[in-house]
Image (cartoon, rainbow, N blue to C red):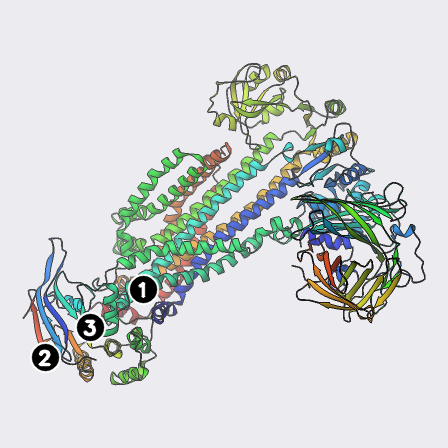
């Protein structure tokens, strides 16, 4: 459990570039960020501004080209694939725009999946989460039998079931209509606060960002 | 396996629960591929056994024989004397029995001493009532056909019981019964000699000076010929393996492609890449093992079903030696499983590699493999080009291995080029069709052909293999039978034991037959290799029938005058001769005036005029002759000859009988080939169905707008089916030259390398047409299900395409 | 079914396969038409040394317990079986319904060499004559030498793929009739055979083995037995012991295994006097293993308690009808040597 004081994310001078026909294009160009336990942070910015890239770097899904990045005490500059995978598995919950549920597993199996991967499966907690997310009646269904909002609620539940200290959400409402998106986002924030979990939320919706403790804006590769 | 790995495996495998049909396809693919491989292995072994049987029938057992020297007789007392001297021998009586119109061979064996000799000598074992077998009037065994022939024949009260798997046209009885039936008194035809004898025996010359020991190769040897056939079946096994690889590749590749997103999710949730790969490999191994085992059983069942009768009786007939061909032996099972695992591994390697290289964060949706495959066209052209370049190198390298390598190169190159050719054809067509629907049809077909390319390649290979092997078998059959017709023109062939006997036979025959042609030969080195020179008289038998491949005009005149020599194809090719080259022979060189085909032996041979032969080889034994006589009288005359001169059964050969036996062997092999055709096409059909089903879901976004534009679902389904058929037809068309090229390689390269002769290729339009129809039927069967699904798809499913694309 | 198996059926001439209903090796099969052993019949020699073709089965069975010049124990076996397919005496040459089978073996402490031969009757490849005595098949023979009297002196030869032997035997005592004057009962149902022995041979000779030739001396025991149904249908096999005891006595003891074990035997004094033994006199106890490689044989009435140990436990006769036969060492109240035969056990 996070202490509420320790630094969960510590980024200094992060640089990330992607190759293009005209040579490498720098997407992040010296990003500094510090995040304490229990905080919720919204990262906004235009399409292509690099918000998702920043999130991926924090989640260890990608590696920086320069700068220092430590997440939950793990130095991501030196961690190998196995160590980064372990960090994600055991201490980070991820929520994607595309939901990314496992289509061949039921709602129940999807909900419990990451907690079981991390070896922290608690059926009572999953049941409680399912109740809170309004999924109790849908546990035997498969993802394709759910609406988009329902799928994203399953994804939120999956991310939180293992009680990770950090949750990363990448445009979680991007594929949902406005009303559904608001409801899902509110639910997510509620649950995150209840658990005293640190949240990084990437979104282009200022309305959604306003619900977070802190907002930063990504522009021209830097945070403002 | 850790709990986490089990969880990941369960997540990956749950994919199959949602797509049972696809799992069935994958399993069926590996299973059929394994079955094909195992089946061909079994059939190969079976063919060997059939040849062994035919070899026995043609008088070539595997054991040495003791036969009486010229003028001597072999009796039961000789047998006893040899046994009392410690020699492990067993007596045989061979003869012919009148049976209604025809005759059957009578084989007398001695069961008690025969056992020590190992399997199959004499060809039969009488199982059952020994007392009835050895005591008059006796008990005989024969196959059902012989029993029919024997109906009404006077056999002195002999009971004949049916027994499968005996040599054709043969009645097997006890040696004593055979002596009685043939009125031989105490005489025996031969003693077979066990290969292992106790140490310290008195030499044969001392114990039985009047007997001659003959090794099996002293008699006619069709082994080289059957070897050729066998080699070609091995080529079929190789082709089946390749086809099997393609199907496995396509099924496994599909499974990998469809789960790219799941793999990404798993990794995003914190499963290390190495673990994902390990679990995927384990999953593949499990599936391959399950399907492989089923395939082995299926292959075994297919092989067993292909040889009804033979399979069941082989073990009883030959003991352990041959029966293993159809037993489920560990080695066989392991090789089948090895094939399944290696095939799945080879196919999975690509998927695993791509999974390993797949970036965790590739934007959005996975690229459908249809598109990915289409992108690989250029690489395929390069691959095909490299293989095509390697082909002549393999040929130049030479030898049998080179030949087979060239075969593999050619086939793979052709397979790789198929999508390229199809794509080019469709591009060409796209510029020429009118009408919006037709244009859409062509464009869409072109897009789809990329995704189906693996399946189409499998179909092409299956068709090419079938055309190639079918053409090869057909060519072989007609060539060999034609050659037998030409070569065995004379009705009877008579081998005497001594020159006086030969003279007496000729004198006795002369007034009753049309012609007696000497077949005298001398062993002579020909271009450095041990060979044989024959003398021939000038007779229409040779001029009209001898299987000449190439000759100078008037070649027979030159041979008759003693101014030219004919050589067999083996010598001609190996020595690199041309017509007109001179060939060194004892007593002076002669120009080569012609070449003849000679499929009966692998060694060099030459023919010169009889007068020249007599002058140059006065010492050559003058024992053998061909007899021209009214074919209707041949059998009776053979019988009379044997009776009159007390000749052993094998000394007089009846041409019609040799041909009948050969034909029977070929027919059996033909039925086997036909069954394999069905199986190979079945594999290709599965590959096609897998590909189509995969595409069906990916293609909805392409079909939905057309549906929205006003085409009914039924019409769309018909078009889809038409598209599949068109692609199959194009593939079949493409397979024809590939298959014929394959047949050419088998006949003109592999055979020449292995045996020194080249078989003329005989293209059978009927075979090709039949296979073309089979290809379309396969495509129809494979395309029916996806088309039906499309016809029944709900509008909401199509509408979702638009919703999802938002 | 392979050729070997087929031959087993063939040679024994009985199609209820051996080991099934017909007792071991078909010896319990029906006897229709064959002659039956007769307690009233007096054995007459040398006539009865020869073949009795009206009986279904007969054997000439010699076992030799040997010691080599190298001080090691050896054993040699020479056996000729005759089997009649039919009691009919018609037919000549190949049609005579008699079949012969022979086994030869040499046992060393480390190895066991076996050979098997088959022959048809009627053609002279195998046979037995009584005057002078000769039994032969192929180049194997057991015969009285020139001027020999009955079975008093014998030369014995056999040869297999990897061994051969030549032995000379000389009897130091008389023939011994078992049971009631040579009528030996084999089971509770009264099955019986004619059975006599010459247990008093002194032998010498030479064994040729893969590792070289070895000169041997020792004792031999010849069994002669003929019958038409020596076993009850339920009897599955037997254990047979023949001992040359160092006090000059000989002992034959046997147990036929069936629903009820049936024991019989003969204790023979050096002068040839016989004490006939039955189930009340003999106690046989097998040790561990199938078949057991050690036994105790007790004759409580005689104060005899013998421990029996195989010279080479691997003395399996890998013949078409497999069984165990080999030399044994005897210790206990008196020492000695001998032979042990065990049939009807599962052997591979």
The label number, if any, that marks residue A204 in the structure image: none
Residue B341 point in image, percent of width and height: 42, 56
Residue at mark 2 shares a chain with residue at mark 3: yes
Classify residue B582 as left or right of residue C191. Answer: left
Please report, as a chain letter, where disc 3 is located: A
- What residue would you read off at disc 2? A210
Question: Is residue B48 shown to the viewer in this render?
Answer: yes
Residue B139 point in image, percent of width and height: 78, 49
Q: Of label 2 and label 3, which has the lower sequence position?
A: 3
SS class, disc 3: loop
Q: Residues within 10 Å of mark 1 (few under 14, many from 20)?
A: many
Question: Is residue B718 shown to the viewer in this render?
Answer: no
In the displayed structure, B698 sits above or below B49; it is below
Q: Nearer the viewer, mark 2 or mark 3?
A: 2
Q: CA distance from mark 3 to mark 1?
A: 28 Å
Q: Nearer the viewer, mark 3 or mark 1?
A: 1
SS class, disc 1: helix
Q: Residues within 10 Å of mark 2 (few under 14, many from 20)?
A: few
Q: Residues within 10 Å of mark 3 (few under 14, many from 20)?
A: some
In the displayed structure, B626 sits above or below B683; it is above
Please report, as a chain letter, where disc 2 is located: A
- What residue would you read off at disc 3? A175
Residue A157 point in image, percent of width and height: 25, 79
SS class, disc 2: loop
- What residue would you read off at disc 1? B276
Looking at the rendered image, the quarter that the C terminus of chain A falls into is bottom left
């Amino acid at each position: 459990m996070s202490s509420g004081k320790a630094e969960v994310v510590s980024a200094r001078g992060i640089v990330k570039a992607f190759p293009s026909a005209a040579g490498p294009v720098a997407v992040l160009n010296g990003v500094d960020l510090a995040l304490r336990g229990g905080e919720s942070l919204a990262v906004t910015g235009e399409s292509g501004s690099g918000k998702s890239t920043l999130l991926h770097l924090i989640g260890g899904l990608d590696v920086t080209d320069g700068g220092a990045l430590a997440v939950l005490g793990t130095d991501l500059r030196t961690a190998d694939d196995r160590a980064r995978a372990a960090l994600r598995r055991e201490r980070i919950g991820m929520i994607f725009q595309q939901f990314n549920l496992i289509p061949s597993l039921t709602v129940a199996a999807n909900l419990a999946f990451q907690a079981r991967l991390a070896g922290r499966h608690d059926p009572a907690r999953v049941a409680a989460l399912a109740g809170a997310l309004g999924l109790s009646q849908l546990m035997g269904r498969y993802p394709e039998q759910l609406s988009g909002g329902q799928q994203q609620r399953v994804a939120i539940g999956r991310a939180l079931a293992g009680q990770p200290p950090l949750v990363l959400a990448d445009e979680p409402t991007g594929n949902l209509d406005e009303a559904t998106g608001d409801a899902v986002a509110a639910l997510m924030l509620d649950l995150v606060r209840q658990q005293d979990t640190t949240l990084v939320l990437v979104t282009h919706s200022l309305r959604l960002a306003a619900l977070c403790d802190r907002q930063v804006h990504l522009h021209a590769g830097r945070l403002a | 396996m850790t709990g986490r790995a089990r969880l990941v495996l369960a997540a990956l495998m749950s994919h199959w629960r949602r797509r049972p049909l696809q799992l069935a396809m994958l399993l069926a693919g590996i299973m059929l591929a394994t079955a094909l491989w195992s089946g061909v292995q079994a059939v190969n072994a079976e063919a060997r056994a059939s040849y062994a049987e035919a070899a026995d029938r043609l008088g070539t057992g595997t054991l040495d024989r003791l036969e009486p020297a010229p003028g001597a007789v072999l009796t039961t007392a000789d047998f006893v004397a040899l046994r009392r001297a410690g020699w492990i021998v067993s007596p045989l009586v061979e003869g012919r029995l009148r049976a209604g119109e025809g005759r059957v061979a009578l084989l007398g064996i001695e069961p008690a001493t025969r056992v020590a000799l190992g399997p199959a000598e004499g060809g039969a074992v009488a199982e059952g009532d020994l007392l009835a077998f050895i005591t008059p009037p006796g008990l005989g065994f024969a196959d059902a056909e012989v029993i029919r022939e024997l109906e009404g024949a006077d056999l002195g009260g002999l009971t004949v019981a049916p027994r499968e798997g005996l040599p054709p046209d043969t009645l097997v009885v006890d040696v004593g019964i055979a002596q009685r039936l043939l009125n031989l008194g105490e005489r025996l035809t031969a003693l077979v000699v066990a290969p292992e004898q106790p140490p310290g025996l008195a030499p044969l010359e001392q114990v039985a000076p009047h007997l001659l020991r003959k090794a099996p190769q002293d008699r006619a040897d069709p082994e080289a010929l059957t070897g050729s056939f066998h080699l070609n079946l091995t080529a079929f096994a190789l082709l089946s393996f390749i086809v099997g690889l393609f199907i496995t590749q396509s099924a496994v590749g599909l499974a990998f492609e469809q789960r790219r997103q799941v793999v990404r999710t798993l990794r995003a949730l914190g499963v290390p890449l190495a673990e994902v790969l390990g679990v995927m490999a384990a999953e593949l191994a499990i599936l391959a093992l399950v399907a492989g085992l089923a395939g082995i059983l299926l292959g075994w069942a297919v092989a067993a079903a292909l040889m009804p009768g033979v399979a069941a009786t082989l073990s009883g007939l030959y003991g352990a030696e041959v029966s293993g061909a159809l037993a489920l032996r560990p080695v066989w099972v392991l090789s089948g499983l090895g094939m399944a695992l290696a095939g799945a591994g080879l196919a999975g390697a690509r998927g695993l590699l791509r999974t390993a290289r797949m970036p965790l964060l590739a934007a959005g949706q996975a690229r459908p493999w249809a598109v990915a495959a289409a992108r690989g066209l250029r690489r395929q052209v390069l691959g095909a080009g490299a293989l095509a370049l390697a082909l002549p190198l393999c040929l130049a390298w030479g030898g049998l291995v080179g030949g087979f390598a060239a075969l593999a190169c050619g086939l793979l190159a052709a397979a790789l080029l198929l999508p390229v050719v199809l794509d080019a054809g469709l591009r060409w067509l796209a510029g020429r069709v009118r009408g919006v629907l037709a244009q859409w049809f062509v464009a869409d077909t072109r897009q789809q052909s990329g995704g189906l390319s693996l399946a189409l390649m499998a179909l092409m290979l299956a068709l090419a293999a079938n055309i190639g092997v079918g053409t090869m078998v057909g060519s072989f059959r007609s060539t060999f039978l034609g050659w037998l017709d030409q070569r065995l023109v004379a009705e009877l062939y008579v081998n005497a034991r001594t020159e006086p006997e030969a003279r007496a036979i000729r004198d006795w025959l002369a007034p009753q037959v049309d012609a007696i042609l000497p077949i005298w030969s001398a062993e002579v080195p020909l271009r450095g290799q041990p060979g044989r020179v024959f003398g021939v008289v000038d007779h229409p038998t040779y001029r009209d029938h001898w299987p000449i491949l190439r000759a100078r005009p008037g070649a027979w005149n030159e041979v008759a005058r003693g101014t030219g020599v004919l050589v067999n194809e083996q010598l001609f090719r190996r020595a690199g001769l041309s017509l007109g080259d001179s060939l060194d022979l004892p007593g002076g060189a002669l120009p080569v005036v012609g070449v003849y085909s000679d499929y009966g032996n692998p060694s060099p041979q030459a023919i010169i005029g009889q007068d020249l032969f007599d002058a140059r080889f006065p010492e050559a034994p003058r024992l053998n002759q061909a007899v021209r006589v009214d074919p209707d009288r041949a059998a009776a005359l053979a019988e009379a000859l044997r009776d009159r001169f007390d000749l052993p059964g094998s000394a007089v050969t009846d041409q019609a009988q040799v041909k009948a036996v050969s034909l029977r062997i070929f027919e059996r092999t033909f039925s086997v080939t036909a069954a394999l055709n069905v199986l190979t096409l079945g594999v290709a059909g599965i590959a096609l169905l897998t590909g189509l089903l995969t595409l069906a879901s990916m293609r909805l976004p392409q079909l939905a707008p057309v549906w929205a534009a006003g085409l009914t679902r039924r019409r769309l389904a018909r078009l889809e089916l038409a598209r599949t058929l068109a692609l199959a037809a194009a593939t079949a068309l493409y397979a024809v030259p590939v298959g014929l090229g394959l047949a050419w390689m088998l006949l003109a390269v592999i055979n020449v390398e292995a045996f020194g002769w080249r078989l003329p290729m005989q293209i059978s339009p009927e075979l090709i047409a039949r296979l073309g129809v089979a290809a379309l039927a396969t495509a129809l069967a494979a395309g029916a299900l996806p088309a039906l699904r499309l016809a029944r798809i709900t509008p909401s499913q199509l509408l979702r395409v638009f919703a999802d694309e938002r | 079914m392979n050729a070997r198996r087929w031959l087993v059926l063939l040679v024994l001439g009985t199609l209820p396969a051996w080991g099934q209903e017909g007792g071991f090796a078909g010896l319990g099969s029906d006897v229709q038409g064959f002659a039956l052993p007769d307690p009233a019949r007096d054995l007459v020699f040398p006539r009865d040394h020869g073949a009795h073709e009206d009986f279904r089965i007969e054997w000439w069975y010699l076992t030799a317990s040997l010691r080599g010049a190298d001080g090691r124990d050896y054993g040699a076996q020479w056996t000729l079986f005759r089997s009649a397919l039919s009691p009919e005496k018609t037919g000549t040459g190949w049609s005579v319904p008699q079949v012969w089978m022979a086994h030869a073996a040499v046992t060393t402490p480390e190895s066991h060499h076996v050979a098997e031969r088959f022959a048809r009757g009627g053609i002279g490849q195998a046979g037995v004559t009584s005057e002078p005595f000769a039994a032969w098949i192929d180049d194997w023979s057991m015969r009285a030498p020139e001027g020999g009297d009955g079975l008093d002196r014998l030369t014995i030869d056999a040869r297999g793929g990897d061994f051969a032997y030549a032995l000379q035997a000389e009897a130091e005592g008389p023939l011994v009739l078992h049971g009631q004057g040579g009528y030996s009962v084999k089971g509770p149902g009264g099955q019986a055979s004619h059975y006599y022995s010459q247990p008093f041979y002194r032998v010498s000779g030479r064994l040729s083995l893969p590792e070289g030739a070895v000169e041997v001396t020792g004792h031999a025991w010849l069994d002669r037995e003929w019958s038409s149904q020596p076993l009850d249908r339920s009897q599955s096999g037997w254990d047979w012991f023949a001992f040359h005891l160092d006090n000059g006595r000989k002992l034959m003891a046997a147990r036929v295994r069936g629903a009820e074990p049936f024991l019989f035997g003969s204790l023979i004094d050096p002068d040839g006097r016989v004490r006939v033994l039955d189930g009340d006199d003999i106690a046989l106890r097998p040790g561990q293993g199938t078949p057991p490689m050690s036994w105790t044989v007790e004759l409580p009435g005689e104060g005899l308690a013998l421990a029996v140990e195989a010279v080479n436990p691997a003395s399996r006769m890998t013949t078409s009808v497999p069984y165990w036969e080999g030399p044994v060492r005897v210790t206990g109240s008196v020492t000695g040597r001998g032979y042990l035969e065990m049939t009807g056990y599962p052997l591979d």
